[in-house]
């Protein structure tokens, strides 16, 4: 014995189509947010440190993964032993302590910064450029995603 629900096939097809639309809406929001982070970080990044041209602005980029569902925005460091880009972001010594104690810096961000920790005696004053861009561009991301999914599925 079987039961057939009239219109179920059409409803499932419509829902399936909306699922694709919803996923695309999420991808579009993530792409826009990643671009916003990239542009603000480039705008805010220091051009020089101690008279040296660092080319930081030219090395900030975004990389898409997982078919548009994951975006990585940052700098491709040339020398992992000398990460001046991270030191300029977080600072060293007292500057790092001050920056990383800000309420919007999570444990995850502090752990990232600690990867570049040397001895805590440094004198580089942090000039954050990447994480402020991240914070401002992602502040309303959940609402943006919800809104775009609603639009896409109506």
Image (cartoon, rainbow, N blue to C red):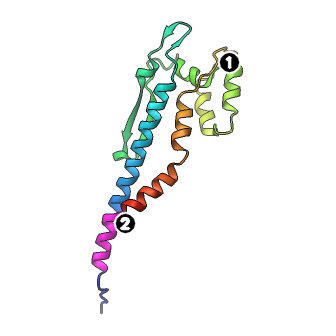
Pinpoint residue 131: horizontal percent, then vertical percent: 55, 33
Q: CA distance from mark 1 to mark 2?
A: 56 Å
The residue lying furthest to the top in this view is 51
Q: Nearer the viewer, mark 1 or mark 2?
A: 2
Please identify the quadrant where the N terminus is shown: bottom left
Q: Does 85 lie within the magenta span?
A: no
The residue lying furthest to the bottom in this view is 1
Please identify the quadrant where the C terminus is shown: bottom left
Pinpoint residue 17: horizontal percent, then vertical percent: 30, 64
Q: Does 10 lie within the magenta span?
A: yes
| Mark found first going from the N terminus, 1 or 2 | 1
Q: Main secondary structure of the magenta part?
A: helix
Answer few, some or many: residues within 10 Å of disc 2's Cα (few below 14, many 20 plus, some between 14 and 19): few
Q: Are marks 1 and 2 in contact (CB under 8 Å)?
A: no
Compared with 65, 110 (above or below) is above
Per the image, the residue denoted by label 2 is: 154
Where on the picture, by quarter, is residue 122?
top right
Front residue of this view, candidates 24 and 40? 40
Answer few, some or many: residues within 10 Å of disc 1's Cα (few below 14, many 20 plus, some between 14 and 19): few
In the rendered structure, find residue 149 and report the number of the disc placed on it. Answer: none
Pinpoint residue 62: horizontal percent, then vertical percent: 40, 33
Where on the picture, by quarter, is residue 35?
top left
Say which residue appears at 57% left-offset and 24% top-offset.
89
Per the image, the residue denoted by label 1 is: 119
At mark 1, the secondary structure is loop
Say which residue appears at 38% left-offset and 49% top-offset.
27
Compared with 150, 80 (above or below) is above
Q: Which residues are magenta?
A: 8-18
**In the rendered view, does 94 fall on the left or right side of 52?**
right
């Amino acid at each position: 014995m079987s039961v057939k629900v009239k219109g179920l096939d059409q409803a499932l097809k419509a829902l399936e189509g909306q699922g694709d639309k919803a996923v695309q809406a999420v991808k579009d929001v993530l792409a826009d947010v990643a671009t916003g982070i990239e542009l603000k970080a480039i705008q805010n990044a220091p051009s020089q440190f101690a008279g040296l041209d660092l080319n930081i602005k030219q090395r900030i980029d975004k990389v898409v993964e997982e078919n548009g569902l994951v975006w990585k925005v940052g700098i491709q460091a040339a020398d992992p032993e000398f990460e001046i880009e991270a030191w300029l972001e977080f600072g060293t010594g007292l500057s790092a302590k001050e920056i990383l104690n800000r309420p919007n810096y999570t444990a995850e961000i502090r752990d990232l910064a600690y990867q570049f920790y040397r001895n805590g005696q440094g004198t580089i004053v942090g000039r954050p450029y990447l994480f402020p861009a991240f914070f401002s561009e992602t502040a309303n991301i959940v609402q943006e995603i919800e809104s775009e999914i609603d639009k896409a599925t109506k």
